[in-house]
Amino acid sequence: FLFFFFFYLIQGEMLTTKLLYPGKIILCIDFVVFCLRLMAIFTINRTLGPKIIIMRDLFFFMFLLSIWVVAYGVAKQGILIENDNRLDWIMRGAIYEPYLVIFGNFPENIDNAKFDMNSCSMNGTDPMKPKCPVLNNKEMPAFPEWLTIVMLCVYLLFANILLINLLIAIFNYTFEEVHDNTDRIWKFQRYQLIKEYYSRPAPPPPFIILSHLYLFIRKLGRCDASARETEFSKKDFRGKEEEEQLSWEALMRDTYMISERQAKSQSMEGCIQDSSQKYNPAESSLSSSQIQAIRWLNTSKCASE
């Protein structure tokens, strides 16, 4: 929302040719944020809402993938290029190119057979070309070709095969867990969505900044940051029909419990258990044969009843 606000601030008060393009960039980024924010609305749907949880596994996968991308990219950049001071080309060689390798864009600068002097800048003075690798006396790259190829093979083995299959396995496990508990997850997500929109201010951006300022001043005066959430938790949203349904469910529950107790007390096992509890204090003064005879009489009595 701040991007939206600052864009209109730039357009309305400081509109110049120089600031028009940066404002357009901010608006484009803001549009992406708004589109991603729409995914929160899907939580109201019983089918699509729980499936959003699967996207959390992607962040865990990206963390594991970033370790291999940075490890291979930094090592490759350090072996091929020496003393390159251009930060953009350093980031491109250390992160961007290793990431594209996963999607099949294999680099040509690690193979001496495909080396071309025209595709790079010798001293790194051309801003449109990367810096050339360290050369030997024959004007060929001096880096060990076998090492860079082995590093690429190991990187592809773990990144393309191991990590991708791990991501598929994680998605399958999460999908099964979510599918088995869809109704429960959907109810929690629906509650959080209703709570969020109940607690947030009503004005749309950029006027929402005024509501935030008002809430900030009010919280400073009251020193209570969770007053609105507490108010939401104490609010009763039940209508008349829901209250009648809850009362009917409570009545049916009590009726079922009473019928179960009556059936248990009238059954043969219940009769035997009650009789045994009555005669337990006297068992200590009787012999084993007398106790067995009394239990047999009780069993016969319950069977006849």
Image: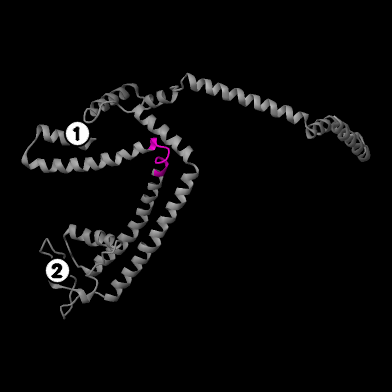
Q: Amino acid at mark 2?
A: Ser
Q: Secondary structure at mark 2?
A: helix
- Tell me the number on the disc at residue 5: 1
Lower sequence index among marks 1 and 2: 1
Expressed as whole percent of the image width and height from the top left, the position of residue 15 reads 8, 36
Label 2 crowd bin: few (<14), some (14–19), many (20+), radius 10 Å: few
Q: Quadrant of the C terminus?
A: top right
In the picture, the quarter occupied by the N terminus is top left
> What is the secondary structure assignment of the residue under circle 1?
helix
Direction from residue 99 to residue 125 in the image, left or right: left
Q: Position of residue 287 (x, y in %)?
A: 93, 38
Residue 144 is marked as none
Q: Pointer 1: residues within 10 angstroms few (<14), some, or many (20+)?
A: some
* Residue sitting at x 17%, y 64%: 84
Residue at 18% in and 74% down: 115
Answer left or right for 67 relative to 137: right
